Every structure is written in C-alpha cells, then in structure tokens.
Amino acid sequence: MPLRILRLGLLVSSIGWGISFLFTFAPWSTAADQLYLMGADRIHYQPLLDYWLKMASATFGCIGIASALACLTPARFAGLIYLLGPFHAVIGTVLVVAAISNDLSTDRHPTFPADITFCFVTAALISAPLLVTLRKSRSTGHPS
C-alpha cells in the first residue's frame, strides 16, 4: 500500500510540474494570455520576461520529468524521492507566505489556492509512505 501511495504522489508531482512545459514552448502571446486568465494584469512582450518564463517553466517541467522517472522506478531514484516530499512542503510554504504578503484574493487570482494545495497534498503523498516504512523498519530493527 505505501508504494501505491508514493507512486500516486510522484505521478501527481510529474503532472503538476510537467504541465509547465506548455509555457516553455508557447509563444509569448499565448503564455501572456494564459497568465491573464490566471489573474495577472496584461503583460506586454519583454524579451527578458519571455526568457525568464521559458527558464522557469523548463525548470519546473524538468522537476516533472524527474518525478515521472522516480514514479516508474522508485528504487533507482530513492535519494530524489526523499528530497521531493520536503521540497513540495517548502514550496507550499513559500507560496502561502507569498500569497499573504501580496494580498492575493481568489476572486482576482483564482489559481493560487490550487498551487498551494498541490504542493501540500503532493508532499503528504510522497512523505507519508516513506515515514510509514521508516517507522516499520525501526520497530522491526531492520534498516529500510
């Protein structure tokens, strides 16, 4: 059971981060329109913003690829998997702080609660099975 939950968390991570590749390959006008639909003001083309969007979205997408690989063969990516749970918790916390400090509201910025929820749910789905396995191995005296 823990492996199924772990794999579900890794699958959610791979989809949640992998979707960012849409911004990597989309032209600026499409990306800016999508950001507008997500609650941002209209953003006129600026070469450096386009560059940063592609850099960030490609990085996020690669996190998705790494999560997908870990989902397919968890034993080969154990080190990464142990980092992904806390990673999602840290990112979720950063997003909560950023949402509060920027006075985001769901009526104007409808997508930020989904981002925060994604991070904490994914952190729990990845971390919980690892903690259960660790607790079992400690109670039996066998290393995991």
Image: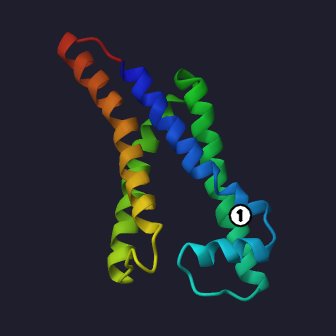
Residue 119 in the image: above or below residue 29: above
Q: Residue at x 45, y 80 (%)?
A: 108
Of residue 66 and residue 45, the one placed in the foreground of this image is 45
The residue sitting at the front extreme is 107
Where residue 68 appears, x then y in whole percent?
61, 36
Q: Secondary structure at mark 1?
A: helix
Q: Is residue 121 left or right of residue 135?
A: right
Of residue 76 and residue 93, the one placed in the foreground of this image is 93
Type of residue at label 1?
Phe
Where residue 111 appears, x then y in whole percent?
47, 67
Q: Is residue 51 left or right of residue 87?
A: right
Residue 59 in the image: above or below residue 123: below
Give the colour scheme of this rendering.
rainbow
- Quarter of the image with the N terminus in it: top left
- Quarter of the image with the C terminus in it: top left
Q: Residue at x 63, y 49 (%)?
A: 18
Q: Residues within 10 Å of mark 1 (few under 14, many from 20)?
A: many
Q: Residue at x 78, y 77 (%)?
A: 29
Where residue 79 appears, x then y in whole percent?
49, 34
Residue 58 in the image: above or below residue 94: above
Give the image quarter of residue 114: bottom left
**Disc 1: which residue:** 23
* Residue 52 in sight: no
Q: Residue at x 78, y 65 (%)?
A: 26
